[in-house]
Amino acid sequence: MSTFLRRIFNKEVPREDELLQLESKLSLERSKLDVQLLSAHFEDEKPIPPGFNNYMQAAINAQAGDKIPLMEEQHNLERYIAFYRYYKGDEILVQYDFPLEAQQFSIFPFILFPLIQNALHYGYHVGAKFPLRIKGRVRGNYLILEVSNRVNHHVQDQSKMELIRLFKSRLEQEYPERYELILNSNSNIFRSSLRLQLLD
């Protein structure tokens, strides 16, 4: 509390490393508790889908700095997409291609979510012609995730969203010098590609 008060009254600016930690934690929290998914859940009159409460409990229990098996991350991702489609119905079409055999690798929880959330929140993915495409692969000790969506012309630039800015901070915090993030778009398609080095 004393540190907080000093910053208020002395107008102390957080150090760069402190800001990185704060933004990294905020990125994790937003990945765990997607506001759009929760809003749809509480506003919709549909029955609660099987497994939703277990998924939310797993999200709440996830802590910064704690790794989970890669297979568990993939399972959470599959559940998240399924619940999002359940509540959004015909508004969203997803082509999901992320085969995994038994893997010994571990990963920081919900680290794969921001790129997909960015596509779901800000992309255009209605109808068979404009699916959200998700492709994941493990090659050696590298995980590669590619996400693409039709550009939403009401959004100026998906790469500039706060969700992405916070995600970059989390990558710097948890995978320094062990990641590559590429974001690009043309007039029709926005693409994001993440390459993570998995050490265990």
Image: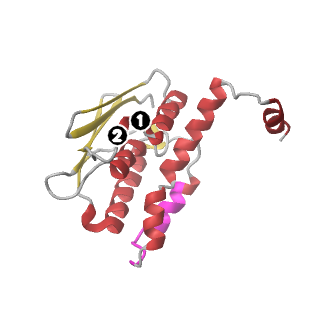
> Is 6 placed left or right of 188 in the picture?
right
Q: Is residue 23 visible?
A: yes
Counting other residues with Cα less than 10 Å from the Cα at mark 1, is it few (<14), some (14-19), or many (20 or more)? Answer: few
Which element is circle 2 on? loop
Image quarter for residue 190?
Answer: top left
Residue type for callout 1: Lys
Disc marking residue 156 = 2
Query: Residue 119 at what x, y percent from top left?
Result: 33, 47
Which residue is painted at 43% across and 40% down in the image?
161
Disc marking residue 61 = none
Q: Which residues are magenta?
A: 46-59
Instruction: Judge depth for marks 1 and 2 and give the one in front.
Output: 2
Counting other residues with Cα less than 10 Å from the Cα at mark 2, is it few (<14), some (14-19), or many (20 or more)? Answer: few
Query: Residue 5 at what x, y percent from top left?
Result: 83, 38
- Quarter of the figure that contains the C terminus: top left
Q: Which residue is mark 1?
A: 160
Report the front residue among 18 and 61: 18
